[in-house]
Amino acid sequence: MAIPPLNMTLARYLVIQAIKNHKIKSTNSSHQLNIDGLCQLLVRVSNLLIDCPQIVRLNIHPLLACDEEFTLLDVAMELCPIVGDPKARLAIRPYTNELEEIISLKNGIKCQLRPILPEDEHLLKDFIAQVTKEDLYYRYFSEISEFTHDALANMTQIDYDREMAFIAIKKNSEIIGVVRVVEYPDNQQAEFAVLVRSDMKGNTLGYQLMDKIIRYSRSRGTRRLTAITMPENQKMLQLAQKLGFSLNIQFEDSIVNLDLTL
């Protein structure tokens, strides 16, 4: 069992578990199961259920897999009219294509701003490796040499209804910046954090990432946007003031509270 939306990583886990539990049965030892093809089919079914909220029941039984071909031998579907917000019926908010946009940096480089995906784990790892220790310290308040697979998975496999992370990605599939926001349960307040690749500073990327998360939070009805940084992080403080944040310096704790009423 799995909850949509599925991606290739989650679908592969589902298929492997089904094989281990003998839910997938082979009738011909000369034909190996095309696991990637089956995963793609499951992802397409997941997308169908997300894009067509009128579907309240879909039964495919059985599915015949032979080499590169997949045949749905029997399918039953039940439809009902949509009532209310179609996305509210989902336990996990799916990826939203409408949040994608193209931006231009000060140096003329164009990049895409989009929500993060589970498949971005290796790109995120490469991105962090190109951030200086000083910038990582400002972001995480501790010295971090390397992130584990579990930590990277937590950063990329998110529920978009409770958390959002936008990445700025160049045409060569390099992540050059990340901004993340986590909403409080009542959505009265949300906390954000931003990190720009160290060699990409001074190109308005930080400003555009912050502007993106402010616009997104407003669209969600969030009342306040907050963050914590260090007094030494002067570029972040200047950027926050430029965007209208109020600054509250706590000298005894060596932190600065950023607050913006939306």
Image (cartoon, grey):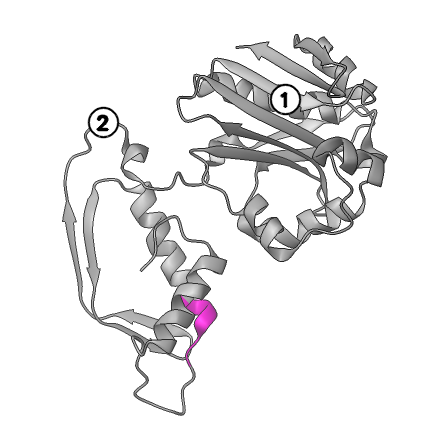
Horizontal side of residue 243 vs 216, given as left or right: right
Q: Residue at x 83, y 40 (%)?
A: 133
Query: Is residue 34 part of the magenta span, yes or no?
Result: yes
Direction from residue 219 to residue 252 in the image, left or right:
right
Q: Nearer the viewer, residue 106 or 128?
A: 128
Magenta stretch: includes residue 183 = no
Query: Viewed as shown, does residue 69 lie left or right of 178?
Result: left
As drawn, 223 above or below 107: above
Q: Which residue lies at the image location 64% right of the left edge and 28% below the top edge?
A: 193
What amino acid is found at the position of numbered circle 1 in the picture? Ala
Instruction: Please determine whether, in this image, residue 224 is positioned above or below residue 96.
Output: above
Residue 211 on image: x %, y %:
63, 19
Q: Residue 236: x, y in percent?
A: 76, 20
Q: Which residue is mark 2?
A: 84
Classify mark 1: helix, strand or loop. strand
Query: Magenta region: which residues?
Result: 33-38
Query: Dot 1: few (<14), some (14–19), or many (≥20) neighbours within 10 Å?
Result: some
Residue 120 appears in the rendering = yes
Q: Earlier in the sequence, mark 1 or mark 2?
A: 2
Q: Quadrant of residue 44?
A: bottom left
